[in-house]
Image (cartoon, rainbow, N blue to C red):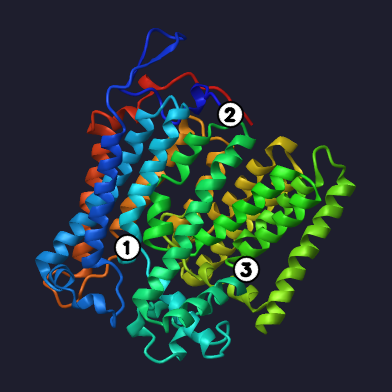
Amino acid sequence: MTADSSETGVPASAETTTEGAGSAVRQRVRKSPLRTVIAGAVGSILLFIGSLGVGWLAAVSEIRQNPVVIALRFTTPGAIVSIILVALGGMLLVREWLRLGQKLNHWGPDTRKWVNAAMISWSVPMMVAIPMFSRDIYSYIGQGRVMQSGLNPYEYGVSTIENFFQLGADQLWSESPPPYGPLFLWMEQGVVALTNAQPDQSVLLFRGLCILSVAAIAWMVPRLARLHGINETRALWLSVANPLLLVNFILAAHNDAIMIALALGGTLAAATWRDWRGGLLGAFLVTMSIAIKPITLVFLPFIGLLWAGKGASWTRRFAIWALTLAWSVGILALMGFVSDFGFGWVSAMSTPGSVFIWYAPVGMLGLIANGVAGILGGDGGKAMDLVHSLGQMLAVPVILYMMFVGRDQKIIRRLTWAFAAIVIFAPMIQAWYVVWLIPLFAVTGIRSDWQVDVLFFLSAFFMIYAVSDQLDVFPYLDIDLSSGRTIAAVIAIAYGAYLWFLDPATRRLFRGKYRSTLQSTVI
């Protein structure tokens, strides 16, 4: 497959020269991508070393007795060094990801090996690192213990199990029901049964599930891109080689990796066959994704559109929608019967929605409403909740519009925007929520204009936020958590500004001088 200028991924860089407006682009590769791949691996190694000092480690973990871990985790200089390494490692990964796109900007058949090499070499250090940027993985262990004890995790939080805090679970969610479906609860129970809830072994098993999921995503992305006429290697670089995906799906080991892998698998099956085989298999895989986290319920109507086939009448579409829904609900009902939980996970869907964050548009509006209501003597909390609820409701008309309006050739793109609406209008937007969307946008086309700029910015922003947010700083050191976060934030922001304005290579990415003529995306 040949890529036109809109599919190059990044504008022509220092490796490309252009002779006059409208003239042909002459590729001139000056440096091998090998140095970029190695530099990215160094960034990942820095994250690994830093995780020994400020990664999330269970209190009863035997790793705490390691002399290197003791030096990095329980001494003030060691903690400071760890924080610096994490900030530098994360931002170095972002830089080398950008540089890789520059050096491979012709996206010919010889470029796939370099993207594969980057994905593998950048992932390996993360596979054995202490979890960072989130401690959800320890909640998985706690929920697995609840399952093993015979209790219903939708009714009993992880705090009902003795010693839960020693195994690393966050007290913030100790009483909350898990926002996960029955399939993931069984996975949690299986891991705990195999490891007897030993935290380090459990972390490795959960991470193993995530690694398999990332490998599956890397296998599916090129195939979905091919269906849309999008350059496969470029789509792989934009999505799976993206450091934001790697640190959230492998280093942090979020179960969202499993969720997205299953949802993409269902989408690929339905899009490949476009008949009852693809429809049934696609809906089944998406239902398994829903049984991990219910948010992928939004995929089902678009699986139905793919199943209905090209040019299907509205009568057929509604009939297939009904069949798709019945098939999915039947599977979930069977899982609920086997687990004896029924549809208890439905009420748990509201658990993440009770929180917000300042940079989410709806979250920011909620904060403003809270302040205004307080000034006027009203109930700021109720005003904030109202804004958050109204904001989330805005996703509904977008989803309905995407279901009913649009060309048949753009069904997966319509699905992407419907899924994006759920994220955009949520009061809480976590980094891994953005990662949900990246593969879908990549396989349906991200142009080399403002679209790829937005991806670059989001990748850098959420990396900066990650390295300065979730740090486990030992509370009895001379440096406290707030100071540690400040150090990481200053380093990461300075590095990001350097990439954007000063770096002789990467600053070219954000300047129209090197941008190729824009064309419409293939789909």
Tell me the quadrant of the picture where the N terminus can be found: top right
Tell me the quadrant of the picture where the C terminus can be found: top right
Residue 82 sits above or below residue 226 on the image? below
Q: CA distance from mark 1 to mark 2?
A: 39 Å
- Dot 3, how many residues are within 10 Å of its Cα: few (below 14), some (14-19), or many (20+)? many
Residue at 69 percent of width and 75 percent of height: 335
Residue at the spot of label 2: 521
Q: Nearer the viewer, residue 133 or 1?
A: 1
- Dot 1, how many residues are within 10 Å of its Cα: few (below 14), some (14-19), or many (20+)? some
Residue type beneath disc 3: Ala
Give the percent coordinates (x, y) of residue 338. Answer: 69, 81
Residue type beneath disc 2: Thr
Residue sticking out furthest to the right: 315
Residue at the spot of label 3: 291
User: In the image, 426: left or right of 46?
Assistant: right
Residue 413 sits above or below residue 75 on the image? above
Give the percent coordinates (x, y) of residue 156. Answer: 53, 87
| Residue 203 disc label | none
Q: Residue 132 falls in which quadrant of the image?
A: bottom left
Q: Residue 466 falls in which quadrant of the image?
A: bottom left
- Secondary element at image label 2: loop
Give the percent coordinates (x, y) of residue 204. Answer: 39, 69
- Secondary element at image label 3: loop
Residue at 55 percent of width and 56 percent of height: 260
Residue type beneath disc 1: Val
Q: Please say whether residue 28 is visible from this viewpoint.
A: yes
Residue at the spot of label 1: 128
